[in-house]
Image (cartoon, grey):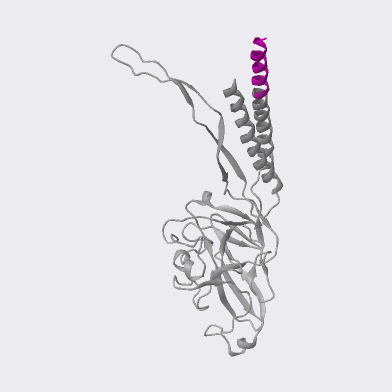
Amino acid sequence: MIRALNTGVTGIRQFQTNLDTIGNNLANVNTIGFKAGRVEFADTLNQTLRPGTPDQGTRSGTASVQVGNGVEVASVRNLFTQGAVSQTGVTTDLAISGEGFFIVKNANNEYFASRAGDFRVDATGFLVTDQGLRVQGFSGSPAAADYADADAIGDIRLDKPATLPAGLAATAATAGVQNVSIDGSGNLNMLLSDGSQFVRGKILLQKFTNPSALLKQGANLYTGITVAGPLAGTSATSPFGSSPAGIATATASAKATTNGLGRIESGALELSNVDIAREFSNMITTQRAFQANARVVTTSDSILQEIVQLVR
């Protein structure tokens, strides 16, 4: 009975974790770029009361006798399925249709991944998140529309550069920015007031071979990943290194619509991928499982009470 009591307690604890995860999913049903979590369970170590014996000749062996000791949470996996894309009409709102993450950097030169593209332009012309982290991208020669692998990675700006690409009209040097558009490949297309056009830069996307290893940091950010290959050996404080040079070789070919990366949709946002109907269904089954394990505890307690009363 003591074993059954402890088994019921482990079930109560683990299903509480499942309820916590479901509650967090439902709380973030309207969070931009949010990825739902899913609890995965595993049985705990079984106690072997009698080992099995192998078959010998014409004599069959015996089956083993094992009693399980409950359940445990194996992992809480983030489900990186595509969320619905909603049109907003705001140029700086970006959604990734397909695989990939935006890369953003804080004031301490720490880099993070994010699927939330609700960006804005700050007072200095940089493309930033609501928390002020700067969006990263390729910022090489504006004359190179495709941006070669050697192009530097840095903060994305949406204002007119100090040096315009060769070939523009002389009057363009004093022209203001009339319009900025972002195409599916992440190119920042600048239109000056005199009609001159050029590409200002390209927004960076990063793909991970094991996105389940990403850790949520709040504010729609992910970090804490160890990636084999070009990203190996990065600093402990940031999964992408502590300076732009630390990620240049790893992300040099990380351009939208290439190498399996998705397309960037300007004027749109990726919504949460939480399925409300599925979450409520999971809540019902989890509640029933919680109640069943609670019943195991009360039943074990009742039987133990009966055993104690036998002594009288």
Instruction: Look at the image and tell me in which quarter the C terminus lies.
Output: top right
Please, is residue 145 above or below residue 272 in the view?
Answer: below
Quarter of the image for residue 16 reads: top right
Question: Where 91 falls versus 177 (above or below)?
Answer: above
| Left or right for 72, reference 91 | left
In this rendered view, identify the residue nearer to me: 289 or 308.
Answer: 308
**What residue sits 54% from the left and 27% below the top?**
69
Count of labels in the image: 0
* Bounds of the magenta segment: 297-312
Residue furthest to the bottom in view is 170
Which one is nearer the viewer's eye here, 302 or 225?
Answer: 302
Q: Residue at x 58, y 90 (%)?
A: 170
Percent position (x, y) of residue 281? 67, 35
The magenta stretch spans residue 53 = no
Dominant secondary structure of the residues highlighted in magenta in the image: helix
Report x, y in % for residue 252.
Answer: 46, 67
Residue 105 horizontal/vertical position (percent)? 58, 66
What residue do we see at 65% from left, 45% from top?
A: 274
Answer with left or right where residue 49 lies relative to residue 223: left
Task: Measuring from the top left, give residue 90's x and y in whole percent.
Answer: 70, 65
